[in-house]
Amino acid sequence: MKVVGISGSPRKGNTAFLVKEALKAAEEEGIETEYISLAEKELNPCLACDECKKEGKCIIMDDINDILEKMAKADGIIIGSPVYFGGVSAQLKMLFDRSRPYRRGFKLRNKVGGAIAVGASRNGGQETTVRDIHNFMLIHSMIVVGDNDPTAHYGGTGVGGHVEDCKKDEIGIKTSRNLGKKVAEVIKFIHKRNI
């Protein structure tokens, strides 16, 4: 059982920190994890060339196909993004748009998915950004979960305008860790039912 955590931030900072906190919580539940930072990857936008319909994968030579392959092999996926004008970062949107070939045959179907968002203020667009991530997951026929009780909302929601602000954001840490725990619990429940 494995969870892949993806930080969609163009820099290493708050989103990366909270995604890693969620992964730590999943590890505490006995789940293997892998962290991916889009800040460290070569990414390019979708060109709408439709070659993926013929090839079964995107023909653009960058890091997207490797990331998508890791997502397809995982049991769960946690995706985090900073809030950019009420939505996900450009880096994360490129990953979403380039996942088109994985919708053919629904290669992400029944993966357990959760979202984390970081805004510059407590009501800084986190819920609309989480919604964007959830929409991506729902369109891929994933199983979408929020954070676990006692917080139990949409997912991890952090506040961080400066690079290390989330290290002091108790609510952001708690909701992100609860999300990691919930993703792990649902994976284990599904795994147990399929044995």
Image: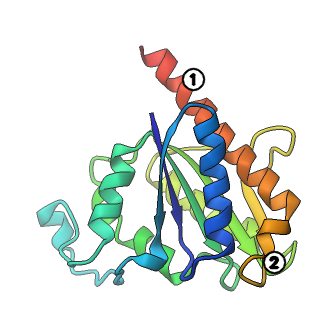
| Viewer-side residue, 66 vs 140 | 66
Q: How crowded is mark 1: few (under 14 residues within 10 Å), some or many (20 or more)?
A: few
The residues tagged by marks 1 and 2 sit, at their Cα atoms, a distance apart of 34 Å
Q: Residue drawn at (65%, 69%), measured in percent from left and top? A: 15
Q: Residue drawn at (81%, 77%), measured in percent from left and top? A: 124
Q: Residue drawn at (78%, 57%), measured in percent from left and top? A: 173
Q: Residue drawn at (63%, 31%), measured in percent from left and top? A: 185
Disc on res. 108? none
Q: Element under label 2?
A: loop
Q: In which quarter of the image is the C terminus?
A: top left
Among the 4 quarters of the image, the one containing residue 117: bottom right
Residue 51 x, y percent position in the rendering: 16, 73
Say if 6 sits above or below 14 in the image: above
Disc on res. 189? 1
Q: Element under label 1?
A: helix
The kind of residue on which mark 2 rests is: Gly
Disc on res. 124? 2
Q: Is residue 146 visible?
A: no
